[in-house]
Image (cartoon, rainbow, N blue to C red):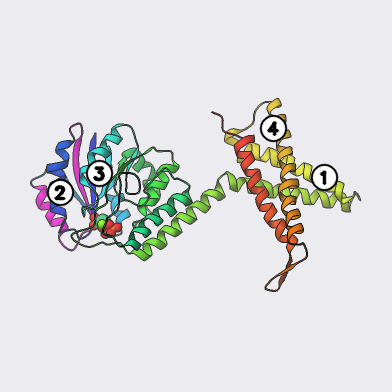
Amino acid sequence: MKIFIVPATYNEKDNIEKFIITLEEEVFPKIKNHEMHILVADDNSPDGTGEIVKKLMKKYKNLGINQGPKKGLGAAYVRAMGYAIEKEGADVVVSIDADFQHDLLKIPAFIEKIDKGYDVVIGTRYSDGGSIPENWPVQRKIFSVVANLFVRSVFMRFNIHDWTGGFRAIRKEVFEKEKEEMKEFNGYIFQIAFLHKAVRDGFTIGEVPFHFSDRTLGSSKIAPLSYIMNVVWFVITTRIKEIATGSFGKFLVVGGIGFVLNAVILKILHDTYKIDPFFANLVGAAVAIFSNYNLNNIWTFKEHKIHGMVQYLWKMVQFYATSVFGVVFIQSGVIFIGDKIIGPDIIFHFGPVAIRYYMIYFVLGTGLLLIWNFFIYSKFIWKKKK
Ligand SMILES: Nc1nc2c(ncn2[C@@H]2O[C@H](COP(=O)(O)OP(=O)(O)O)[C@@H](O)[C@H]2O)c(=O)[nH]1
Ligand SMILES: [Mg+2]
């Protein structure tokens, strides 16, 4: 395969020469089965980084540079990786910092994982064998670990140990699939956004633990505060969108339709046909549950749709049983417990609004009911087939 190491540089004149020589003289000789290249992704560094690279290009024929205006780290990677793949025929591109914080000698381990078939291989600082600089102040260490844990937790992807790092080998298929969407992530947020999309699309992720060294020459270009704000914003809004458009969001829409059906039937049967509200509501609830069952079956959980008359009826019985159980024991149960322990008629003042406590139990109970229902539906009624 044709493999391009793509270091990003902005004002790295103190590092770039030694960086390139180390790759050429120490790393590449260890990789026998692939054709190795370097393409420096430089944003017209005013300090002359580009000139140093161009001088070295006379000596190393597999060295190139891709320059453009400074739009941020992500933009530089999209531009240079795109060039390597589309113009130079790269099969794999490796993103890496040019300041020696990423251990160059780990590159062969990345390539071995690519050889094993992984689509993306990421360097991990936060798993066995990986680490962050010893001499960092405690608060920086804690911050680094917590930030990464935050991303893992919000995305609920604990098997990926480093979301924010930039040391990665990427197959061209992955880059080509994600590059359009990456155009809006110009800065350092590129790293999280890219990995998130690759995982979403089912690409396999391999990991290589490495020791993240401290920078010794040149200076960091990251603006920590705006980076943190970007990370928090990106991770939270992405997760909310995922939940809203995923099966939980559909489940809520279906439940909302059921609720409206229930209310309308109750009102019509009582107001127009003078049926006792208790029985009118039973009919309304039965129709709502029927609607929920069918809409969830054809929409929310359509990937695990129930087929066959017998299965359909049997699951419907389970669905009714779950729904009734939830209303009686969970939703009404919370109201019952709240009533008995705290009392129904205490009034809670929320600005000009006065809320009786039983309404709070109702809201809590309904919240728990939704979680219960969603859990049972996705784990039992529409469970994934092996
Ligand atoms: N091309 C390009 N490279 C950048 C840019 N910002 C940072 N880099 C490079 O990306 C790598 C990581 O940046 P650095 O400032 O060390 O980030 P830190 O390690 O998180 O402090 C270094 O090699 C930088 O020169 C940019 O806007 N454009
Ligand atoms: Mg750095």
> How far is disc 3 from disc 2 in space, using C-alphas?
17 Å
> How far is disc 4 from disc 3 in space, using C-alphas?
53 Å
| Image x and y of residue 164, in percent | 36, 52
Quadrant in which the N terminus is drawn = top left
| Image x and y of residue 296, in percent | 65, 40
Marks 1 and 2, the one that precedes in the sequence: 2
| 10 Å crowding of disc 3: few (<14), some (14-19), many (20+) | many
Q: Secondary structure at mark 4?
A: helix
Is residue 48 in the magenta section? yes
| Image x and y of residue 345, in percent | 78, 65
Q: Which residue is mark 3?
A: 84
Furthest residue toward right: 274
Disc 2 + disc 4, Cβ < 8 Å: no
* Residue 20 - label: 2
Q: Nearer the viewer, mark 3 or mark 2?
A: 2
The foreground one among 362 and 82 is 362
Residue at 14 percent across and 37 percent down: it is 29
> How far is disc 1 from disc 3 in space, using C-alphas?
66 Å
Q: Which residue is mark 4?
A: 315
Q: Secondary structure at mark 1?
A: helix
| 10 Å crowding of disc 1: few (<14), some (14-19), many (20+) | some
Dot 3 amino acid type: Ala
Dot 2 amino acid type: Ile
Quadrant position of residue 105: top left
Q: Which residue is mark 1?
A: 282
